[in-house]
Image (cartoon, rainbow, N blue to C red):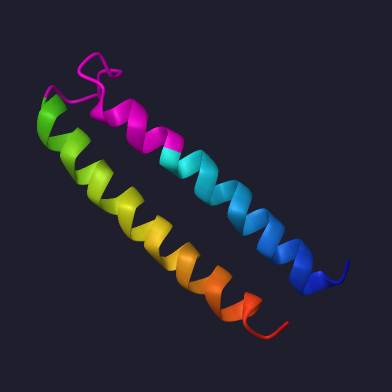
């Protein structure tokens, strides 16, 4: 396994973790956010995590295609 393979493996693991966080945030009983604006904070966090997942998927695709 070379360095790129390890990067791809790590990115897949991070993507899996982030998707789990998205599922938790969509759950009506998700943890409270500090500051009192729980629904807005949860929505903004979901958007940010979704954007991160998309970027990670681009990296996985780009580096997997070089193999």
In what quadrant of the picture does the N terminus appear? bottom right
Residue lying farthest top? 29
Say left or right for 65 vs 23: right
Magenta stretch, residue numbers: 20-36
In what quadrant of the picture does the C terminus appear? bottom right
Residue 21, quarter of picture? top left
Q: Which residue is rendered at x = 77% and y = 62% of the image?
A: 6
Residue 33, quarter of picture? top left
Residue lying farthest right? 1
- Image coordinates of residue 14 in percent, x first then y, are 56, 49
Residue 24 is covered by the magenta coloring: yes
Q: Nearer the viewer, residue 5 or 34?
A: 5
Q: Is residue 54 above or below residue 33?
A: below
- Image coordinates of residue 30 in percent, x first then y, are 28, 19
Q: Nearer the viewer, residue 66 or 47?
A: 66
Q: Which residue is rendered at x = 24% and y = 24% of the image?
A: 34
Say left or right for 62 vs 55: right
Q: Which residue is rendered at x = 47% and y = 65% of the image?
A: 57
Q: Which residue is rendered at x = 67% and y = 55% of the image?
A: 10
């Amino acid at each position: 396994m070379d360095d790129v393979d390890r990067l791809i493996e790590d990115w897949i693991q991070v993507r899996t973790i982030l998707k789990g966080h998205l599922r938790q945030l969509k759950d009506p009983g998700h943890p409270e956010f500090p500051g009192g604006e729980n629904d807005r904070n949860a929505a903004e966090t979901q958007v940010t995590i979704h954007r991160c997942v998309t970027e990670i998927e681009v990296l996985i695709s780009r580096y997997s295609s070089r193999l």
